[in-house]
Amino acid sequence: MNDIFIVFLWQTNIQHHMKRRDFIVRGLGAGILAGTGLTLGGIGRLAGNPAATEDGDFDLVAVKGSDPASMFDLAMEAMGGMGRFVKPGQTVVVKPNIGWDTVPERAANTNPQLIGRIVKRCFDAGARSVSVFDNTCDEWKKCYVNSGIEEEVKKAGGTIVPGNSESYYKNVSIPAGKSLRETKVHQLILDTDVYINVPVLKHHGSAKLTIAMKNLMGVVWDRRWWHKNDLHQCIADYTLHRKPDLNVVDAFRVMKRNGPRGVSVEDVIMLDSLLVSADIVAVDAAATKLFGMEPEDIPYIDIAHEMGIGNKNLSELNIKRIIL
Amino acid sequence: MNFKILKWGRVIISLGFLILITFFFIDFTNAFSGRVIRSVLYLQFVPSLLSFLKFAGIGAAGFIFIILLNLFAGRIYCSTICPLGTFQDVIIRIKRKLTRKKRFSYQRSFNYLRYIILILSILLFIAGLVFPLLLLDPYSNFGRIATNLFRPVLLFLNNSATSMLESMSIYSLYRVEPGMHHWLSLLWSILILLLILYLSFKYGRLFCNTLCPVGALLGWLSRFSIFKIYLNRTLCTSCGKCSAVCKAGCIDVKNKSVDFSRCVGCLNCLSSCPDNGVIFGRPGKSEKAVITTYDDKRRDLIRGSLTAMASLAGMSMLAQGRGYGRRRSNQPLPVNKEYPVSPPGSISFDHFNGSCTACHLCVNACPTHVIRPSFLEYGLAGIMQPRMDYHASYCNFDCVICSEVCPTGALRPLKAEEKHVLQLGKVIFIKQNCVVFTDNTDCGACSEHCPTKAVYMRPFRGNLFLPEVDPDICVGCGACEYACPTDPKSIYVEGNPIHLTAEKPIIKKLEQPGQQEDFPF
């Protein structure tokens, strides 16, 4: 099983990085792993925090150097396995960013193979149903198809759910919200047992960056109101309604400018990374640094930290770093 | 009897056209490509004629084929190809099933009214006004009726079925909620439908022989047809069986004559005659005299022309008085006055308003529902013709469906690459309305949605960013206007009376990061 997995890693690495040096380093790494039969958790110990605690105790796992789906598997291994988050018989909602009618190479939407893998792993863990939706910006059918996400979800056996009609959204109140006191939320979010948030890390013209907290704007209906009433405060306020159980940040291809829609593939750089955390503020802070900015530059991260929604101080967190 | 085969062939082809065309107008899944749709609509008379006048060529010569058919055997268009004609036949069929009164009878003609409408339509069209033609063109009226009245029924059924399935966690259907169209388009559809229902219930195909300009033109032309329907004076016993089935009411058994200009070519009369007295063929000299009453018609034509001329003067003044005139596109943009935005491929208001019959096919085809019937935004001359309604939605950057389906040539087919630099209008930013300026909070919804970054964010007051616009690379898609949360809007698209070419956004290469060894945290 391990061998198959490593061969898979090796192949995708060749696809994404044709540099000779990478090829040798990774080929060698794979050879060592295959030869010694180390467990996957062991990879992390090779490159990660030497004082690592047992798998499952990390606040945040960061992986770099492979394809998104494989990095997700590695990260979840370190997080203590999918079974920690999805119990047999539970319903799951996976919320990617499918906001735009663009192809995966433009990195305006979450990586489709990553979504497909997450759906598959939810079923592996015994999920009864896995639903995927977004309240898109561009025309929803085109977004679902051209992002590649609809196809991957269906392949993995998940359910693609529309988010295009106000009738799906139910009013919820957020008593502790400062600016956002009530908003309309997609019924699936209200009903689901498990809630997995899978944003893509991108530049954003309005919110500066869009990561995990900002991605939740896609589960509500009346976004214009947020824009009109202190956007950053609304983004932070909304996390009080229901925090995702798990946040998976796709930083494989990253849109560096002209976000969130982008103009061409030239807006995209390869960071080959993936972050996983149950703490939505921590994962946003780490992704911000990965992007090359500081959490203090992004008002909603500061606000959410102050409101006690999560911890933006990465030095206080137990982080597992996996570099392949 | 081979007349029966002929008749049933006609019925099957006409139902085929009706079903397909109805489907085009109610379909919300874009099931057929623009090429298929335009092929089926190739023979629609008015769209083809308009398209031919703008882009002469075999691709738009369907109406010539119709005229040739007409010169061969009369109004085959009216009996077989026109969706509104077949729709009336369906109503008539239902009526005959429901009521006891199953007989039609000979009706007097309304040639005076008929030719006024025809001549007015032609003259006003030559003067550059499509709208009288647009109000009565049978294909376009059928399109509007299907769009405004049939489609909502389908959407209601679809949406109900969707919510039923969704309650069982089945998401194979999806809801479609385009919202209401302008009341004028809705009202006109209701009026025409009621009129059609009344006339066809009471008099058969009276609409086709009084109000329809295509029926009038083809009727007039059918005097030259080689094959005609006539009564054999020796075989006919004036029993009236043929006129009882004639929905055009054009068979006068008393005088054993047929007003072939009003015959819609349904062929029902042929098999009704017990004495084989109804003939479909070349009339000899003796029959010719009684087929039509030429003198009457000539007088009507002349009277009609005179009345038409008189009302033409008044109507064209009225049309020019409202909105913009035909030469408007050369005049400078009026300050603070918004032009409408015409759909992609419409070239210019002059071209568009002069060739669109407001059939609403593009309105239905548009996946984002941004194309909507207008009111007086183009002036009276462009009444009900579609425009881009950026309060309802915005135009998808890569989508060209509307331009592909248009049968009249009002929208020229576009390739996606052409559309990427096609400028329908230009963005205008009103800083004083913008929430960043007034409330000191981040917004940028406009810039978020902009596909070319003609709207971009510039540093402003501390950590804030304020939109700025570069109209040269704006394509006028309206995404910024739609997304803007303020009321009134802080950003909007001013339509281009002549569509222009936008500059391509300048794309600089980004440096890819080196292989970093560690995370920055």
Image: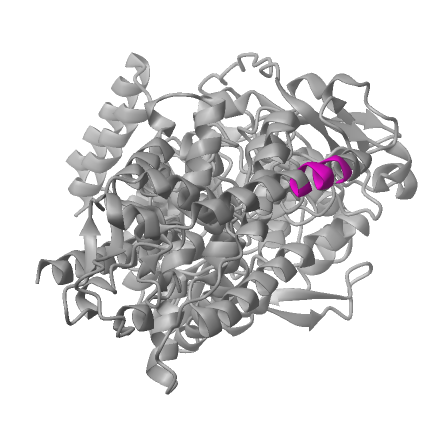
The quadrant of the rendering that contains the C terminus of chain A is top left
Point out residue B229 in the picture as x, y percentages from the top left corner: 26, 53
Point out residue A321 in the picture as x, y percentages from the top left corner: 46, 39
Judge left or right: residue A108 versus residue A32. Answer: right
* Corner quadrant of residue A8: top left
Q: Looking at the picture, does residue B223 appear above or below residue B419? A: below
Q: Is residue B175 magenta?
A: no
Q: Looking at the picture, does residue B270 appear above or below residue A235? A: below
Q: Looking at the picture, does residue A102 appear above or below residue A97? A: above
Judge left or right: residue A130 versus residue B472. Answer: left
Point out residue A96 in the picture as x, y percentages from the top left corner: 48, 50
| Residue A269 shows in this picture | no
Majority SS type along the magenta span: helix
Q: Residue at horizontal 18%, vertical 61%? A: B234
Q: Residue at horizontal 23%, vertical 56%? A: B10
Question: Front-most of B234 and B127?
Answer: B234
| Residue A91 shows in this picture | yes
* Corner quadrant of residue A125: bottom left
Residue reaching furthest to the bottom: B100
Question: Front-most of B178 and A256?
Answer: B178
Instruction: Report the number of discs.
Output: 0
Q: Residue at horizontal 72%, vertical 51%? A: A224
First to last magenta residue range:
B307-314
* Corner quadrant of residue B309: top right
Judge left or right: residue B267 versus residue A308. Answer: left
